[in-house]
Amino acid sequence: MSTPGSIVAAYSADRYGEAAVEHAAALARKEGARLVVVNASLGSSLVDARFAHDADIAALRDRLAADGLDVVVRHDVVDDVADAVIAAADEERADLIVVGIRHRTPVGKLLLGSVAQRIILEAHCPVLAVKPAG
């Protein structure tokens, strides 16, 4: 990235989402870019454990802003999570999307679509896939 732009982090309320946010925040700090965190779900936090509670989103926003980042957090119930992340990146003219990836079994890959995979394949900007340390 040659000029400051924006970086989108696909955030889920788990260690994979935290890995995505930490990598995206480090890159945003380094590049002087705006950080856009997208936490989207097809349902509410009562149904989808990866959809963060409002208080957790506020704490995440405060933590990132205290680090000196220009941060926006999108926290929405949507029709399609991958589409929501890609749309946020398009609207922000993002330079990069960062997604956390998890190991899935061969059967899991066959039966369930992968949000990260769809983002990687369909995004209009580069995508960095990261995994938690350890």
Image: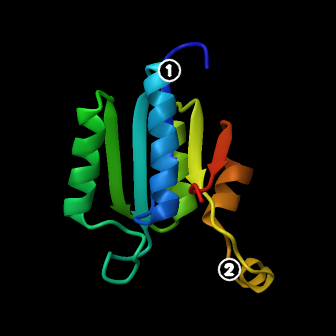
Q: Residue 99, image x and y in percent?
A: 58, 52
| Disc 2 crowd, CA 10 A, few/some/many (<14, 14-19, 20+) | few
- Image colouring: rainbow
Placement of 73 over or under 41, stated as above or below: above
Dot 1 and dot 2 residues touching (CB under 8 Å): no
x then y, percent, for residue 128: 65, 43
Q: Which residue is mark 1?
A: 31
Looking at the picture, does residue 56 appear above or below residue 94?
Answer: below
Q: Please state which amino acid type lies under the numbered disc 1.
A: Glu
Q: Nearer the viewer, residue 57 or 131?
A: 131
Q: Which mark is residue 125?
A: none
Q: Circle 1 sits in a helix, a strand or a loop, which is it?
A: helix
On the image, the x and y values in percent for residue 2 come to 60, 13
Mark 1 and mark 2 lie on one chain; the one further toward the N terminus is 1
Residue at horizontal 33%, vertical 66%?
A: 52
**Who is closer to the viewer here, 130 or 75?**
130
* Residue at image point 21% right, 52% down: 58
Residue 99 against residue 8 in the figure, above or below: below
- The secondary element bearing badge 2 is classed as loop
Of the numbered discs in the image, which one, if any, rests on residue 112?
Answer: 2
Task: Please say if 33 is above or below 9.
Answer: above
Amino acid at the residue labelled 2: Leu
Real-space Cα separation, disc 1 to disc 2, in angstroms:
35 Å
Which quadrant does the C terminus fall into? Answer: bottom right
Residue 38, image x, y percentages: 42, 51
